[in-house]
Amino acid sequence: QNGTCQYNASARAATCSKYVELPYGDEAALKDAVATIGPVSVAIDATQPTFFLYKSGVYDDPQCSQEVNHGVVAIGYGTLGDKEYWLVKNSWGEHFGDGGYIRMLRNRSNHCGIASYASYPLP
């Protein structure tokens, strides 16, 4: 579109001068960052129909690949029954999954590529 840029630097919500990329596929490093830093940006494979249909439990689809195509935020981790999981906030609103969140399988060969491209900002 032609015209004048309407960007107003004084109205920005945040700044990021640097960021940290975690080692590729390292779920232990991701767990440490979530525990000590806070939310971590991650990318996942969100192409499986089971992902779109997720409502509860721990998402565990053997067809999920490590070819990532969707950005989400890892905000926590835990265990449900005998399955370890990442608590992930999606960007599709509260109608997706469990109120906008999904529990994704943790410590299972980088399931859905969740630890492939993890990063967080520095102030």
Image (tube, rainbow, N blue to C red):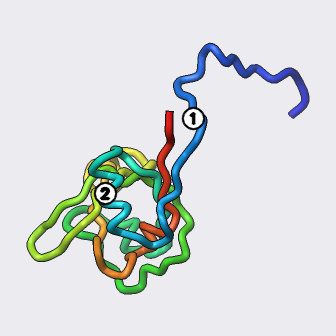
Q: Position of residue 65 (x, y in %)?
A: 47, 80
Residue at (32%, 52%) from the top-left corner?
34
Asked if residue 52 lies left or right of residue 82, the reply is: right
Q: Where is residue 27 in the image (x, y as percent from the top left)?
A: 36, 69
Dot 2: within a 10 Å radius of its alpha carbon, few (fewer than 14), some, or many (20 or more) residues?
A: few
Name the kind of residue labelled 1 in the image: Cys
Asked if residue 5 lies left or right of residue 34, the reply is: right
Asked if residue 31 lies left or right of residue 122, the reply is: left
Which quadrant would the N terminus be assigned to in this image?
Answer: top right
Residue holding disc 1: 16
Q: Position of residue 24 (x, y in %)?
A: 50, 70
Residue holding disc 2: 32
Name the kind of residue labelled 2 in the image: Asp
- Residue 46 visible at all: no
Vertical placement of residue 73 versus 62, above or below: above
Quarter residue 6 falls in: top right
Q: Which residue lies furthest to the left in this view?
A: 81
